[in-house]
Amino acid sequence: MGQSEREKMLTDQPYRGSDPELVQARARARALLARFNASSALALAERRALLLDLIGDLGPDVWIEPPFFCDYGRHIRLGPGVYCNFGCVILDCNWVEIGGQCKFGPNVQIYTAYHPIDPIQRRSGLEMAAPIRIGENVWVGGGSMICPGVEIGADTVIGAGSVVTKNVPERVVAAGNPCRVIRSL
């Protein structure tokens, strides 16, 4: 028997996002996100319970400010002490691993999903997704975008508004569009 569309998605192979299993999983995530995003700032236990149900691996002391958006949630791994400010978007069509003590400014967007460059292939409805890994103690400035397949090394700073299209080593400050290393730490 062949691979499921979810298995293809998680191994960066062309897959159909319209697959019923994937549609159902996204609907589940949307329902949990709606509840999380509408929850009271005083309902800390409810928020934690919703995140535990949504996120695949949720470390202790993770704090996510609503509104928060993701595709599935179950493909996200957040280490201890991760902080996501308002408006964080994680398109987790593949694994997103974020190390402990990472800080994300408002409106940071993390995209594992991408579409074929070739217009004929794009019309077919197939899409792909590449994993993203972010090391421990990374600070990503507000409004930054992290593109599919990127790895960011530990203790790095990504300047606000950056578009990270390629891997960034550890212990550097990087910024811009496209994001480039400015200096070592």
Image: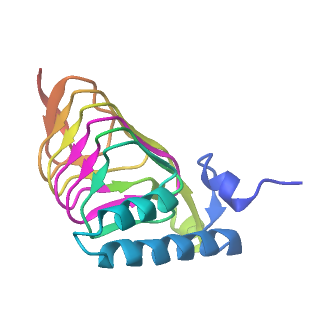
Q: Residue at x 17, y 59 (%)?
A: 106
Q: Residue at x 84, y 54 (%)?
A: 2
Asked if the magenta segment contains residue 83, the reply would be: yes
From this viewpoint, which residue is outermost toward the right?
1
- Is 4 on the left-hand or right-hand side of 22? right
Give the position of the C terminus as an image quadrant: top left
Q: Residue at x 16, y 53 (%)?
A: 105
- Is 19 on the left-hand or right-hand side of 95? right
Quarter of the figure with residue 49: bottom left
Q: Position of residue 20 (x, y in %)?
A: 69, 75
Residue closer to the observer: 52 or 149 = 52
Q: Position of residue 131 (x, y in %)?
A: 48, 44
Residue closer to the observer: 93 or 118 = 93
Q: Could one spot residue 117 in this view of the protein?
A: no
Asked if the magenta segment contains residue 75, the reply would be: no
Q: Position of residue 62 (x, y in %)?
A: 32, 48
Q: Could one spot residue 14 in this view of the protein?
A: yes
Q: Residue at x 21, y 44 (%)?
A: 103
Scheme of colours in the image: rainbow
Residue closer to the observer: 139 or 117 = 139
Residue closer to the observer: 149 or 50 = 50
**Depicted 156 relative to depicted 121: above or below:** above
The magenta span reads 82-109
